[in-house]
Image (spheres, coloured by chain):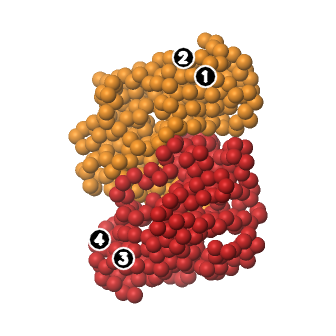
Chain colours: A orange, B red
């Protein structure tokens, strides 16, 4: 499709498995996922007049969610893949009209805030490119605050920009620590404009208001990872939160891990007190209280 | 001082320069800071009955701020030390009773939320230990959410725990990217209890409510760093925010860098989409709008 700047378009987005999982799937289906089919995106859309050096301004207008989703631990994938070697799957159902918190039976409720996990443009570099890693032009960024009302700016590297979107999530925490969110098919309505020769190096965005108020009402439990490596710190903080949730609420470790992925946030508390940095994992108390 | 569990104690905390900077200081004083005197802490306090393996539960009751503070770029220190080689200093004054946002003349106002940058126990390892890096037992963690009402749990490694606190900040963003916050002398009232044989590996804490509502009212400008290294991603995201703020508001780069340090947040948006991670820097729009 070719569209002019100023256009508003509705996209249909399948779930990140590309239809290999459904609301009836079980954990036995997880090992059979064909990775050649995962993370499909809808596009590309050619934006008239877009040239390398421009920024594509994408206004995220609206989501039309499907009412179901899945979260999985996929062996070999995720921040703690070495500790969680077995597949796991949780199927979610939620009120697609009211969009109230989704039950994590029987112990909690996760507030929802839909966004596209993958949103971006074609890179200039020739060849085939995996859709898994995000790049300068965006892609699988999994930024949970790209919610309705947000404006995203993407650096254009090819004529026409070649925009695609998909991998829609009903909810996710910062980090997406188990590797999956509430993966949920939904439609999304986006507007497009151009900023000529914007000189943008990587994506940036503007949120119209607060980004965490669906989660923060009762405060947070917070664990820390302290040391010379941010990745090790992140792993340590998340591991300790899993231990805390299991000890306190009787969850199985993999259940706590998947719950952390859909609602807990990884933050860098300090990155200057040489040689040790602090990464903190924030778990919103209202999910389990 | 030796105290029993259940005690509540008021601590007097000088600023992080140990009195080398004052409300009358200028940038000419920054290169003369004696690093042997920085980051003084008040303590140690011996907690009766504390033994290795216990957790010290610290309830953060109250702050009595001084009404002034400083933020500096100290050469050789900070996330972008290679880009900001010259000293800089900003002196803040604020209403220590009303604690309204502090002016960053003439272009902005920074909401305040006091916390101790350094709070921790003695490590078991023999010898002298620099107070700069945080450790398993806490210390210079610079976690901006250790605000009034928060409960902090610290792992005890020596008999009596040997608690100290200092480096009080009137405000800071997650990351403390330029290396300093609003460094401000203040008194702090803390309560102490013990959890015997808690099995805690690193500090954790519980917040009584939301942690970002003093900043989030008008949303955020957000820049990203995308790549294989979290540290590089953090540096890239902060650099691009400095460029954005300078271009839009006419700040000098070092002014934007220091402002980012006192109110902007580093978050890990995704840490699983191999091999590229996304670190995002969130600048609260209400500071400059």
Q: Answer yes or no: do the residues labelled 1 and 3 have beta carbons within 8 Å?
A: no
- Asked whether residue A245 is in view, the answer is yes
Q: Which residue is mark 3?
A: B52
Quick one: SS at disc 1? strand
Q: Which residue is mark 2?
A: A9
Q: Chain of mark 1?
A: A
Mark 2 and mark 1: Cα distance apart in space: 8 Å
Mark 4 and mark 3: Cα distance apart in space: 11 Å
- At horizontal 55% and vertical 51% (from top left) the residue drawn is B265
Q: Which residue is mark 4?
A: B195
Quick one: SS at disc 2? strand
User: A143 or B287: which is nearer to us?
Assistant: B287
Mark 4 and mark 1: Cα distance apart in space: 56 Å
Q: Position of residue B241 (x, y in %)?
A: 65, 46
Q: Position of residue A112 (x, y in %)?
A: 37, 35
Q: Are marks 3 and 2 on the same chain?
A: no
């Amino acid at each position: 499709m070719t569209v002019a700047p100023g256009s508003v378009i509705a996209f249909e987005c399948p779930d990140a498995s590309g239809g290999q999982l459904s609301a009836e799937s079980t954990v036995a289906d997880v090992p059979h996922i064909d990775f050649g089919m995962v993370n499909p995106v809808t596009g590309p859309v050619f934006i008239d007049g877009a040239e390398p050096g421009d920024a594509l301004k994408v206004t995220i207008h609206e989501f039309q969610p499907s009412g179901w989703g899945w979260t999985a631990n996929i062996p070999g994938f995720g921040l703690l893949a070495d500790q969680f070697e077995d597949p796991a799957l949780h199927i979610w159902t939620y009120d697609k009209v009211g969009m109230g918190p989704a039950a994590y039976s029987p112990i909690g409720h996760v507030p929802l805030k839909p966004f596209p996990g993958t949103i971006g443009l074609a890179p200039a570099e020739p060849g085939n490119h995996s859709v898994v890693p995000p790049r300068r032009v965006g892609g699988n960024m999994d930024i949970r605050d790209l919610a309705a009302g947000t404006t995203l700016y993407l650096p254009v590297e090819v004529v026409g920009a070649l925009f695609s979107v998909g991998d829609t999530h009903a909810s996710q925490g910062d980090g997406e620590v188990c590797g999956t969110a509430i993966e949920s098919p939904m439609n999304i309505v986006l507007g497009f404009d151009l900023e000529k020769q914007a000189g943008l190096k990587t994506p940036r965005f503007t949120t119209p208001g607060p980004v965490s108020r669906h989660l923060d009402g009762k405060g947070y439990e917070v664990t820390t990872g302290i040391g010379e490596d941010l990745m090790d710190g992140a792993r340590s903080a998340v591991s300790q939160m899993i231990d805390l949730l299991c000890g306190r609420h009787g969850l199985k470790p993999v259940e706590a891990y998947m719950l952390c992925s859909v609602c807990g946030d990884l933050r860098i508390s300090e990155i200057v007190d040489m040689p040790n940095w602090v990464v903190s994992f924030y778990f919103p108390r209202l999910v389990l209280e």
